[in-house]
Image: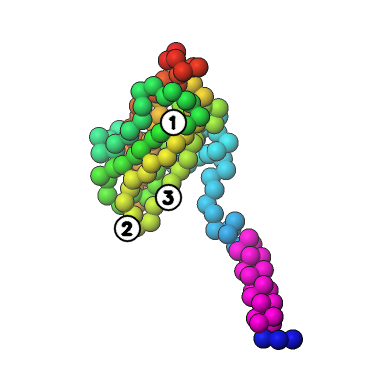
Amino acid sequence: MNTPRRNFLKNILATGGALVLGTAVLPSMADWPDVAFQAKTTDEALMALFSGKDVQDSKQITLDVPETAENGAVVPVEVSTSLEQVESIAIIVENNPVPLVSQFNFTENSVAWLKTRIKMAKKSDVIVVVKTKDGNLYSTRKSVTVAKGGCAG
């Protein structure tokens, strides 16, 4: 067997081994809040995510969403906060069939800012809950009307 062919085969085997190891290890590393995503109400989702801790309203959280979303399938959301040591940011849509839309976890030196698009079934409050490293919860909310057929309704 010549050297290029041997190197090619070694690389293929190494890549296959890495893929097998990666698919076995990565799912165990994911912290997926199953119960929270199965919740049917906002209160159930908050209980599953934060074990019933009190949530305080905060003016240190900025939530930028349109008052009227032209298309409920792609509603732009931007969240930022001046709170220190942010651990996670959760986005909840009160009147969605599954209220918890997403939860973003941050590392110690991250900037607590995110921009995403969410799906909304109908007019609802969009609620953002920020959890800090000390376990305190802060939130803000804004109402969004979902246009029907391109007309606000």
Q: Earlier in the sequence, mark 3 or mark 1?
A: 1
Q: Amino acid at mark 2?
A: Asn
Percent across and percent down for residue 104 are 43, 46
User: Which marked residue is nearer to the observer: mark 2 or mark 1?
Assistant: 1
Q: Is residue 19 located in the magenta-colored stretch of the structure? A: yes
Residue 102 in view of the camera: yes
In the drawing, does residue 12 fall left or right of residue 111? right
User: Which marked residue is nearer to the observer: mark 3 or mark 1?
Assistant: 1
Label 1 element class? strand
Q: Is residue 33 located in the magenta-colored stretch of the structure? A: no
Label 1 crowd (10 A; few <14 / some 14-19 / many >=20) = some
Label 3 crowd (10 A; few <14 / some 14-19 / many >=20) = some
Position of the N terminus by quadrant? bottom right
Q: CA distance from mark 3 to mark 2?
A: 12 Å
User: Which residue position holds label 2?
Assistant: 109
The residue at 69%/80% (across/down) is: 5
Rendered position, 69 above or below 4: above
Label 2 crowd (10 A; few <14 / some 14-19 / many >=20) = few
Magenta stretch?
4-24
User: Which residue position holds label 3?
Assistant: 105
Percent across and percent down for residue 2 are 71, 86
The reply to whether callout 3 and callout 1 are in contact (CB within 8 Å) is no
Q: Amino acid at mark 1?
A: Val
